[in-house]
Amino acid sequence: MAFKFVLSLGLLFIVCVPSLQAQDSSLVWQYKEIQKGDRDVALAHYNRGLFLEMGEKHEDAISHYQTALMLFPGFIEARNNLGAAYYNLGMMDDAVVELRRVIQAMPTHKAARYNLASTYFTQGRFKNAIHEYKAVLDTMPDSYDAQYYLGICYNQIGEFKLAVRTFETLLHEQQDNPDVSYQLATNLFAMRQMARALEFYERTLSMDPNYKYSTEIHTMIEAIHERGLARK
């Protein structure tokens, strides 16, 4: 399952770090104390890395982010993007290291939290991903992606009741979203709540008759009817 990582974009073609105002005082102090020449070179490497990353030239981007961080180790946005570049190259362990360093320095960094959760998800470390998705939702309670993948994580560890609760909440906000309806039906089926599972399988098809899992849905609906499970 592919994730679109959240890159830090605030420094593109500018020579200041507005995001540092939100970081702790030690990082702001560190930024002010580095030599102006080093600061400008670090920003230039960051901007070049961002340009390359947006062009999917991840290896080249990594080199520039690393140079920026050698000059300015407290450069939070460069480290977040370095983690994203590692992820895009399949270097998951390296991505985790960098993203955790961002969060250790700035626990409220929303992009790094989401990126770390997505990395854990891709690694199959669903309990770790749950912790990070919850942290994202603490600061961005309306994040669709965080809620959706939190529900998937609950499903993957067999916490179907929590998955159902998550997708019910999300469906209330996304009433015409077939993906959410399908996930809700799937978890209800896992809990053997067949009547409700049938309701949401049918609702998914009513939203999109050509839904990507329509063949599977028709098979599930037929099985429920054939076995008389909808009455249970």
Image: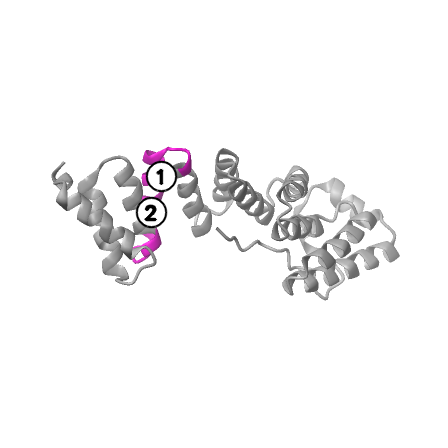
Based on the picture, tell me whether residue 164 belongs to the magenta stretch. Answer: yes
Q: Quadrant of residue 12?
A: bottom right
Query: Where does residue 147 sit, x and y in percent of width and height?
Result: 42, 46
Give the alpha-carbon distance from disc 1 to disc 2, as whole Å: 9 Å
Q: Is residue 199 left or right of residue 39?
A: left
Q: Residues within 10 Å of mark 2 (few under 14, many from 20)?
A: many
Image disc number at residue 183: 2
Q: Nearer the viewer, residue 79 or 212?
A: 212
Query: At numbered mark 1, what does the secondary structure look like: helix, strand or loop?
Result: helix
Instruction: Give the x, y percent position of residue 159.
Output: 37, 33
Residue 106 appears in which quarter of the rendering?
top right
Question: What predominant SS class does the magenta segment belong to?
Answer: helix
Where does residue 70 sit, x and y in percent of width and height?
A: 82, 48
State the residue at coordinates (23%, 59%): 206
Q: Secondary structure at mark 2?
A: helix
Residue, disc 1 = 163
In the rendered image, residue 98 lying in the magenta stretch gets the answer: no
Q: Nearer the viewer, residue 219 or 49?
A: 219
**Disc 1 to disc 2: CB gap under 8 Å:** yes
Residue 142 location in percent, x, y?
A: 43, 50
Give amino acid for label 1.
Answer: Ala
Looking at numbered disc 2 in the image, what kind of residue is underneath it? Gln
Residue at left 26%, top 55%?
204
The answer to which of marks 1 and 2 sits earlier in the sequence is: 1
- Magenta region, residue range: 156-179
